[in-house]
Image: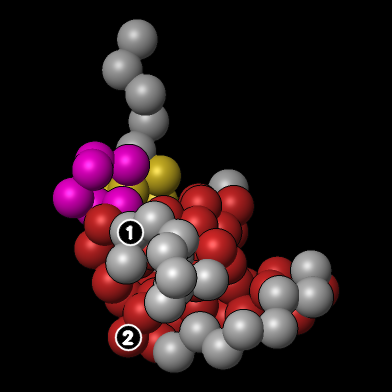
Amino acid sequence: MLLPSKSVPADQALLAVGAQILVQLEQPGSVSAVWDRLQEWRSAHAVESALPFWWFALALDVLYAIGVVDQRDGELMRKSRAA
């Protein structure tokens, strides 16, 4: 699930979807706004595999668990790097 395997294509692995989400978080946004931006990005980049919302949510969970995203005031955002 985290990494590609025989049953999980590379563009659907949670880390790959997480990377796609991070691209969308160049600007903070609500969960639904980030979901919409991700869908548009995947379409523009010809990523044809289906991405259900629950898989998007799992990828967000992974990003939160490894400490790269946060939510403040209802908006998702990248965590800033410590200096």
Residue at the far top in the pictured view: 83
Image mark for residue 27: none
Q: Amino acid at mark 2?
A: Trp
Whether residue 51 is visible here, answered yes or no, is yes
The residue under label 2 is 54
Task: Give the percent coordinates (x, y) of residue 8.
Answer: 44, 73
Residue at the spot 42% in from the left edge and 77% down from the top edge:
7
The residue under label 1 is 2
Residue at the spot 44% in from the left edge and 89% down from the top edge:
52
Task: Give the percent coordinates (x, y) of residue 15.
Answer: 41, 55
In depth, the one of 58 and 82 nearer the eye is 58
Point out the stretch of residues depicted in magenta: 63-68
Whichever of labels 1 and 2 marks the residue nearer the N terminus, that label is 1
In depth, the one of 59 and 72 nearer the eye is 59
Is-magenta flag for residue 74?
no
**Colouring style:** secondary structure
Q: Nearer the viewer, mark 1 or mark 2?
A: 1
* Image: 12 above or below 64: below
Task: Give the percent coordinates (x, y) of residue 44.
Answer: 81, 74
Q: Horizontal placement of 64 versus 68: left or right? A: left
Circle 2: element type: helix
Task: Give the percent coordinates (x, y) of residue 53.
Answer: 40, 87
Circle 1: element type: loop
Quarter of the image that includes the C terminus: top left
Whether residue 74 is visible here, answered yes or no, is no
Label 2 crowd (10 A; few <14 / some 14-19 / many >=20) = few
Q: Horizontal placement of 52 versus 2: left or right? A: right
Q: Horizontal placement of 42 versus 19: left or right? A: right
